[in-house]
Image (tube, rainbow, N blue to C red):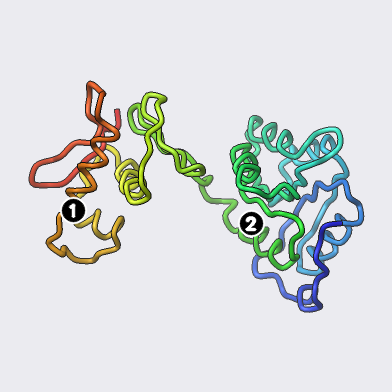
Amino acid sequence: MQLREPDSSVWTAKPTTQPMRILVIEDDREAASWLIKGLAESGHVADHAVDGEQGLNMASEGLHDVLIVDRLLPKLDGLSIIRKLREDGVKTPVLILSALADVDERVKGLRAGGDDYLGKPYAFSELLARVENLGRRSGEAPLETRLKAADLEIDLLTRTVTRGGKPIVLQPREFKLLEYLVRNAGHIVTRTMLLENVWDYHFDPQTNVIDVHVSRLRSKIDKGYDEPILQTVRGAGYMIRDS
């Protein structure tokens, strides 16, 4: 069982959020029992599903504030459960637990519709913090993972950019600049806004840093296309065309 033994302070800690009803979908009964005990002693109510099919049926009822889903389950794997729930419009936040914890696997989990991903072995205190954070976020809008303007797309998980399906390679600062511009697509973005939000400058240092980066970015995202997507608004700033 890939767990870390809790210290005594974990079990006596008071909950930092309102009590929640949590569904644990875990086929390892010993691991599930340990987890449910910790959640209960932290002030929450926990239900248990022993396989993927039972977990999907229970989660589909929409009675839980957070789901804790093991990645590898009998009958139906964790990612299939999450995909089915999202297809059916169930938006309950999901924390994925898995021994498969490299970057590619985390990306797969998040793209399937998971909200957070925790690798095994884990400390209960970290799991509790993540679950309670998901509970607080449950009423908020889902986390954005893709941005789009016209035929340009940004994948925030893999930090990749495509235009018309063709990949565009950007340097980190260029990516940050483009992300900010696309988040404000259709609106003029001033030099001051760029300095404060992309370079963290709160004044204009009379530098051409913006002009240089915008020029480089334009050469990468507009070169070879009939219609430029990055526009200069004379005397005002810049704008990404949104259609």
Q: Nearer the viewer, residue 108 or 124?
A: 108
Residue ID at (75%, 53%): 22
Percent position of residue 60, x then y: 74, 37
Residue ID at (23%, 66%): 202
Compare marks 1 and 2 and give the one earlier in the sequence: 2
Quarter of image, res 42 = bottom right
Residue at the right extreme, as displayed: 30
| Above or below for 189 versus 200 | above
Q: Nearer the viewer, residue 105 or 139?
A: 105
Please rate how many residues cluster around mark 1, counting C-alpha atoms within 10 Å: few if below 14, some from 14 to 19, many from 20.
some
Left or right: 50, with 102 as reference point:
right
Helix, strand or loop for disc 1 = helix
Left or right: 237, with 110 as reference point:
left
Percent position of residue 79, x then y: 71, 37
Percent position of residue 45, x then y: 79, 59
Amino acid at pointer 1: Arg
Work out which quarter of the rendered image holds the C terminus and state it.
Answer: top left
Amino acid at pointer 2: Gly
| Disc assigned to residue 135 | 2
Residue at the left extreme, as displayed: 235
Total label count?
2
Provide the residue designation for mark 1: 191
| Discs 1/2, front | 1
Residue ID at (77%, 78%): 9
